[in-house]
Amino acid sequence: MPTQTTPEPGLALQMRGIRKAFPGVQALAGVDLDVRRGEVHVLLGENGAGKSTLMKILSGALPRDAGTIEIDGRAAALASPREARGARIAIIHQELALVPEMTVAENIFLGRAPTRFGFLDQPAMVRDATTFLSRLGANIDPNLLVASLSIAQQQLVEIARALSLDARILIMDEPTSALTERESARLFATISGLTARGTAIVYISHRLDEIFAIGDRITVLRDGRNVATQEVRQADRRALVRLMANRDVDELMPPMERTTGTPRLRVEGLSHGNRLHDVSFNVRSGEIVGFAGLLGAGRTEIARAVFGLEPFDHGTVYVDELPVDIRSPQDAIAAGIGFVTEDRKREGLVLSRSVRDNVALPILRRLARLGIVHRKAETAIAQSSVRDLGIRTPSVSQLAQNLSGGNQQKIVLAKWLATGARILFLDEPTRGIDVGSKQEIYALINELAASGVAIVLMSSDLPEVLGLSDRVLVMREGRITGEFTRAEASAERVMACAVGI
Amino acid sequence: MISSSTLRRIVRGRESGTTFGLLVLCVGLWIATPYFATAANLSNVAEQSAVIGVIAIGMTFVILTGGIDLSVGSLVALVSVVIGSALQRGVPVFAAVAIGLLAGVVSGALNGLMITRGPLPPFIATLGMMSVARGAALLLSDGRPISGFPDGLRALATGEVFGVPAPVVMMLTLYLLAYLVLTRTVFGRYMYAIGGNEEATVLAGVNVRRWKTVVYAISGLSAGVCAVLLVARLNSAQPIAGIGYELDAIAAVVIGGTSLLGGSGSVIGTLIGALIMSVLRNGLNLLGVSSYLQQVAIGVVIIAAVLIDMALRRRVQRSSR
């Protein structure tokens, strides 16, 4: 690992010892980052490695607990997005941050629209917006409402907005995730133009090809720490992947010899608008089937449709080879299906209620006679869940909001196990969970499969999918584009399938 | 069992602040004016709290699920008039009351359907119902009070059980029932879960639409019970009855510590909130404070109660971390 002893000239950005803790998680444990002028500096790391947190701090969206930031050699506080903008730092968000009810031009100049005599200068705004959009080769009418644009077009508007800020430091968080190859190529050309003028670019992406095409240097983060910084020219793909994970996937998730039985769940020809196209798959009892794919490829949509949360146009769901008509979560639960959603705070838990109330919620009717809850039975079930799943809580009366992310996720799992679900959809089961708890969740998933539960694992964490699944299905744009056995599945092959090379 | 755990709740639970407030208020008034603590006055205070107290039960349920019901004041008028005109047409007291309560339940269920099937925001749906019910009450009565009822109804207001006025007995019975529903039944758990996180509750396989509709129907029912008490007490049915009751009921719920965001609170708190409001009104009357100033005082108490409650809750949260 090259260590820098003398301060380098030409540094646009120097971050030193940046620390940030969230309740239960040390997201950043002293991260350093140097970015030279005119450089494309790639930030690499698994989900949860701390990349986004670091960039939120740089763009003033999050306060840091400790650490210093220098911009062009001068200390900067960056206490608010406004200050960051004053320091000419711009960010292109991964999640689009546009106002759908406003026009393209209004979005590009949001908060700093040109005025004449105190009134909006509409013509100037449209003219300037057109200039920035055409530099990206984007043929978008600035007068259109953002709501009417495709995701790719919105992405381009977001990039145009960043360009219009004339930033010295431009942060791009997976800017190509929604773009076509052609649009991406155009973006790369624009990036070269910017770096030639001295703009420093921090580039976050998981697409290795892209990184090797436009990156100058790479910094790898893992678990909130620096792992390495190196020149792209000298970097080796395999080594990079190892640096990101630094653990053998096998070691992370012990392989399980599983005897898998008859198809427990079979989905035939599931289609819904332009989000799902003729999706068919089956999961046997005791099997873990992983769904890989880029963000928005349609994984969550499958789970929501099968669980009765979204209607679908075509398709049949079979449980134990019998067709079932699922129109609501009640129907799904009755058919023995459970769904651990990707957003446990919004959809998984009632945070203001106790561990006991959360575990018992789907089975309250069973625990009641004449509508009156049998409290001893309720407590007993909650206590055995706490024991079996190793939920760390002082008591079952503790409020869910006071537990860590990992323990909260275990409550969600406990809830579905209590219903006696034999088919479990797990959507991003370890998102936002620290490494230690991840291991425990993985062990639990393996145990569940061993006990005969059919598991559908949906995750954008590739090592997770590869390490846990008996079979891997890859999705792209609402279709299943590939299927691999455990032996066939490799990061490169799955990725190639997910991006459609 | 119930009473001991309830006592513990009051002493140590989240209602402790409001209970303490009520006690301070009572002791203060006792010192300021000896008449306050007489049996006659206390029974009068309790009786006055019954009217808002009963509506506030339904309001607590609604607010616990994260909703609001602005229509209850108008529903009091509608149910009053329905009972009045039924009695006028010679319908027996029992049947007239039943028809009135049914009208309350149906109107409440309509609110619920507009909210769950519309889906309209509760504020809008019940704001509409507030106007519709008031207009219906005025149409039905031609804008005039209806009076001249048989004695059977009066007994509901004037009767006593072991020296306690009947309305007070009714209110306390309903509070006990509501307390048991909230703490012991599946329905009670669902209310807290819906208010705490509606999406997660849907995902847990709970028929949230149905239960929310039931909650609004119960709110309509409690407005109906309030109307019965009112008609019995005044011996007349007023189409302009209940104006502003919805706000008094919301105030009682909020003073009692139930969060307007839903998911946390209790019906015991609401009872204490309703008592605080009527003790305060009674005390200010005894002290000869003008009714204008009374309004100011009540407003100040509402704001202070919520500020104190929020501060206490923040402390509890911090200490439980």
Image (cartoon, coloured by chain):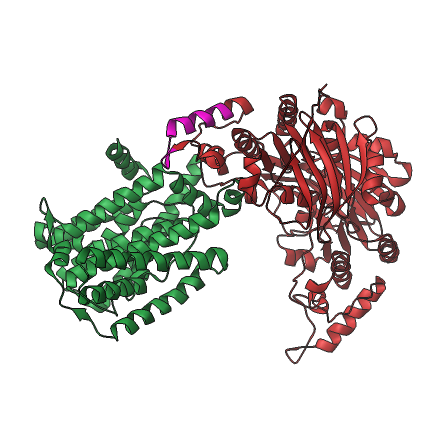
Q: In which quarter of the image is the N terminus of chain A?
A: top right
Q: Where is residue B199 in the image (x, y as percent from the top left)?
A: 53, 46
Which quarter of the picture shows residue B179?
top left
Chain letter matching colour green: B
Q: Quadrant of the C terminus of chain A?
A: top right
Q: Which of A245 and A6 is in front in this view?
A: A245
Instruction: Please tell me how many numbered marks the rendered image carries.
Output: 0
Q: Where is residue A363 in the image (x, y as percent from the top left)?
A: 47, 34
Span shown in magenta: A369-385
Which quarter of the picture shows residue A328?
top right
- Above or below residue A195? Residue A208 is above
Taking the magenta stretch, the answer to whether it contains residue A371 is yes
Chain letter matching colour red: A
Looking at the magenta stretch, what is its main secondary structure? Answer: helix
Q: Where is residue B169 in the image (x, y as percent from the top left)?
A: 18, 47
Let me know if residue B302 appears in the view: no
Which quarter of the picture shows residue B107?
bottom left
